[in-house]
Amino acid sequence: MKQTYRRFCAVLLILCLLCGCAAEKKVTVISLPGEEKMAVEEQNAPEATPTAVRGKTGEEAYHLELQKCVPENLSGITALTVLGDTIIAGGPAEDGPQLVCFPMEGGKTRTLDVPEDTDYLYALCDDPDGGFFLLSGSLPAGYVDARGNFKFLTGDPEGNLALSRYDENNNLQQTTPLAKTYAEPGARFFQMAKTDGGAALVSASMLVLLDDNGAETARQTIDTNDGWAFASMVESDGTLFILTRDMLGGDAPKLRAFDAKTLTALEAQTLPSGTLGLGLDEDGTFLLTDSDALLSFDLTTGKVQTIALWRELGAKTNASQLFRTKNGYVLFSPNEEAVSLVLWKASTTNVKKVLTLAIAADCPVWYEFTQLFETFNLSQNDYRIDYTVYSDSPYGDGEPLDVLRTQIMAGDSPDLFAFYSDGSQAPPLEPRAVCADVRPLLPDVTETALLPGLFDLLTQDGTLYALPLTVRVDTLIMPSNLIDHPGVTLPDLEAAREKMPDDWVAVDSWNTPENLFALTAAFCIGRFTDRENGTCNFETQEFYDLLDWCKRWGGDGSTPETPEKTLLKRGWISSLSWLSGREDIAKEWFDGAGYTYAGYPVGSGGSAYLVLTSLGVSASCRDMGGAKALLEYCFSCEQESGLPANMDALRKEFAQYKLGNRTDWYGNPETISDADEAKFMELLNSITVLEGMDKPLEDILREEADAYFAGGCTAQQAAKNIQSRASLYLQEQYQ
């Protein structure tokens, strides 16, 4: 069973290896801070060796800069090679696969011819005699389309491929169809090399050698079912070296070697743990990438040297293919939208000011945060964010949160904070305890700039401690023929239950009284507490009735074999994709009836926001101008973790759905009707509560209410116990 699971995981991970990740479509440059030092050698000329991060020629200093370069018209890059100072790149475009060439450091992009009847560009490599070779053909089983969406081929892949030669002027000279088809799983070639033995092609599962007629002369394979896969290839002195990775992360990567004329396997060498990419430097040493740095590796001595730290360059790249050029390095992974360039630059630009940022989150959004801050670093020339992840999660590589807390208590707070909450646990840091008011920095972030009601809900004592980036909306959904307006009350629910069909249940059987009350806890805090004054009042008939409703309506905790028709459905809305086709989905839920965002029956009823991601600024921030630049940038960026808190961004996202520019996992267009949009906006205008603001207080309510549901006390006694504990807590925290 374990072996089967490992093989399943291996397939998914190898798909990820082949598909790559989308990068920001921007052409920008950043610089290293001139005063910071790295433990590497200084050289007399920056181009002399890859082991120098800065050097001097006469009186002129040099440093490395990272930039992202996006080829014109391509939605992604499936194949790439470098000829001198020119990049040759191919990938999907609106009119079919396109091949382009462009100078590395700016200049005109030229479109090149592709062979007839070509559906996909697989790999490129230079021709030692001048020019280059292209491997192209029919579509693979999985591919990225012209809009950047990953799709699976309908039907089986044909596996028809051809090898084309281009001359030194980039003109197509000859196309030779391959004698065999390559349609088996794992046969999507992503790199090739021209050697004395012919053309070597590598995919995740195989290495093949072709003669000049396109016939296969030799083959080596690897069992991807065990998690191992070929990841990158270089040729040196008649030997093919292939980076071979355990995609499940159990073993260190290996550098496997094969004779370039026969593919006879030679001795393999273990590479540094975490190696992601492979290239060859001018002096014969290998170039490597990992999650921290661009490196050089001497095969003879095993010595590893740091060329550049991603941290100091302001962004990282997980490239698999690396190229050395006169002025730096080209880094590339198939299906990326951008090429990464690490180039030598004279130190004539302004040194960036560095701001430190703590990502304080036990959560799955670390990657999204880091991508956001790296694209910021690449977007302008004045500031660089140096971020550190702090987490107690066993699944991440962050520093322990206690390290951050100790730093703050010692007066060494970071300049900025990034927060995340999913509402299930207390946040590791309270923004109001470590952050200053962001409103003086962002005077344009007002009630109208944020989603309806969000500004007022977030503002405490006239202070906005954190800028929300993304949110989730939490509500209850009911059939529109029984409830036709947002803001449901307990009498409304009782009336609807009387009218519901006999074969329906009020709530799902698994939704016990304890669960049902837990859904209302945040609403109860908003309704029965005054946190600004540190007071509460739970000993009311309204609260008794709410406890009684949860006990009477809650399910028995069972999970029936057949789906139940329920009066109440829970809606956790963290993406506009949730709205796509919602009316039709609701008709399946409610036997043909439409839907209403009813909300929760606390007070006059209402729904809730949960702030998923947000940013805060320390009162001791060293550069408020840099903090302002970051907050403005992030507030305007499209993000993936939830609904945008920015009202303008939400309107733009709705427009994209209306235009048919959003697709599901399978590439099918997702659309939102005018009626669904209007209903959702009505929901936003009805929201009265902010969830996740006081998890310890929510825990008090649930603990004492559970005793009532278990029969240990009356509703009045439970309310009294809540009142006692909540009063003490509020006095300690807020008075």
Image: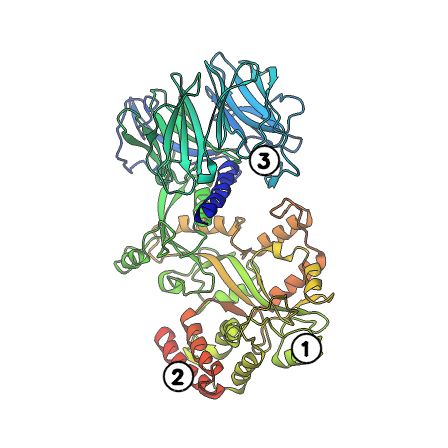
Q: Are marks 2 and 1 in contact (CB under 8 Å)?
A: no
Give coordinates of residue 634: x percent, y percent.
Answer: 48, 50
Say whether residue 651 is visible.
yes
Give coordinates of residue 151: x percent, y percent.
Answer: 61, 40
At 38% from the left edge and 16% from the top edge, which residue is drawn? 237
Q: Is residue 561 above or below residue 306?
A: below
The one nearer the camera, 326 or 362, is 362
Mark 2 / mark 1, whichever is N-terminal: 1
Pointer 3: what residue? 75
Label 2 secondary element: helix
Q: CA distance from mark 2 to mark 1?
A: 35 Å
Q: Answer left or right for 570 relative to 596.
A: left
Mark 3 / mark 1, whichever is N-terminal: 3
Q: How many marks?
A: 3
- Please state which amino acid type lies under the numbered disc 1: Ala
At 41% from the left edge and 51% from the top edge, which residue is drawn? 627
Give coordinates of residue 679: x percent, y percent.
Answer: 67, 63
Label 3 secondary element: loop
The one nearer the camera, 240 or 37, is 240
Mark 3 or 1: in front is 1
Tell me the quadrant of the picture where the C terminus can be found: bottom left
Give coordinates of residue 432: x percent, y percent.
Answer: 39, 64
Residue 496 tag number: 1
Mark 3 / mark 2, whichever is N-terminal: 3
Residue 724 tag number: 2
Q: CA distance from mark 3 to mark 2?
A: 61 Å
Q: Answer left or right for 200 relative to 580.
A: left
At 57% from the left edge and 17% from the top edge, which residue is drawn? 214
User: Residue lying furthest top in this view?
Assistant: 129
The one nearer the camera, 525 or 553, is 553
Mark 2 or 1: in front is 1
Binning the other alpha carbons within 10 Å of mark 2 as few (below 14), some (14 to 19) or many (20 upward) gives some
